[in-house]
Image: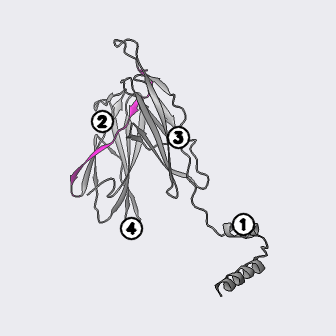
Amino acid sequence: MKFFIFSFITVVLIMTTGCQDQCCQKDLKDSLIVKGNLTPVAEITGVPTQMTCGTSFTANGTTSSDRDGEITNYTWTLDDSSIGTDTIRTAVLPCDDAEHTLCLSVTDNKGAKAQTCQKIAVVKNESPNITVPIDPDSCNLIPIVTYEKADAQQYKFFCAESLDHNKPIDPNTTNCKWTATKTFLNGNEQETHNVKGPVKWINVNPETFKALDLTLTVTNADCVNSITKHYVLPQDLPY
């Protein structure tokens, strides 16, 4: 009885669709399957595999791609430490005669992620007394955002650990500018005014607050550079 019912359904399928062979029926079955989101492709260009101690590099992620959508987020890490979320990132390698790992993680508009990494070896100086000069005309500002929880609903963000030619920035000659955009649970967005100074206070109410995009721009007489950090409550800003 069960065999008769199965055969009847098969005959109905063939008569209805016009599929009279197994390949045709397989194609019909495959056409009814909703294809999943394709994973994006992360790609790093512009970074050599060896560099001289103390020099900066500019990593380019713009050749990364997504075949069925668009890339909405870029995250750079150097030795597992975050160094930026721009499509192009400039950083400085420490003078430690070691091998370092630069990684780019990308996320597409449907949440699929991909990562690629590249090894960068610092070229050892033949003499420990040799100091590799840094081009004074190059832009070696690296914005770095740190924060601490001030109280139940406020965070303090700092720019003091940003680097200028691989050294902490001088607050007397380097300006920090903040731009914050809050996203609330009800879907509304509120962009705060631009604020200058070494510290940025953000009020975070867990009952209404969802996410924060915070941009730090550091500027001195030679150049300007920015970094944007995306924080989600409570994963990135625990309360």
Where's the N terminus, which quadrant? bottom right
Tags 4 and 2 in contact by the CB under 8 Å rule?
no
Q: Kindly identify which numbered label has been placed on residue 61.
A: 3
Q: N-terminal of the two: label 3 or label 2?
A: 3
Q: Kindly identify which numbered label has been placed on residue 149.
A: none
In the image, residue 153 above or below residue 26? above
- Give the residue number, with chain letter if any, for mark 4: 186
Residue 175 pos. (x, y %): 33, 36
Q: Residue at x 67, y 82 (%)?
A: 6
Q: N-terminal of the two: label 4 or label 3?
A: 3
Q: In the image, is 32 to the left or to the right of 17?
A: left
Question: Which numbered mark, 3 or 2, is in the foreground of this view?
Answer: 3
- Give the residue number, with chain letter if any, for mark 2: 161
Separation of residues labelled 3 and 2 (CA atoms): 25 Å
Query: Label 4 sits on what residue type?
Result: Asn
Q: N-terminal of the two: label 4 or label 1?
A: 1
Q: In the image, is 88 to the left or to the right of 8?
A: left
Instruction: Check disc 1 and report its element: helix, strand or loop.
Output: helix
Question: Which numbered mark, 4 or 2, is in the foreground of this view?
Answer: 2
Separation of residues labelled 1 and 2 (CA atoms): 59 Å
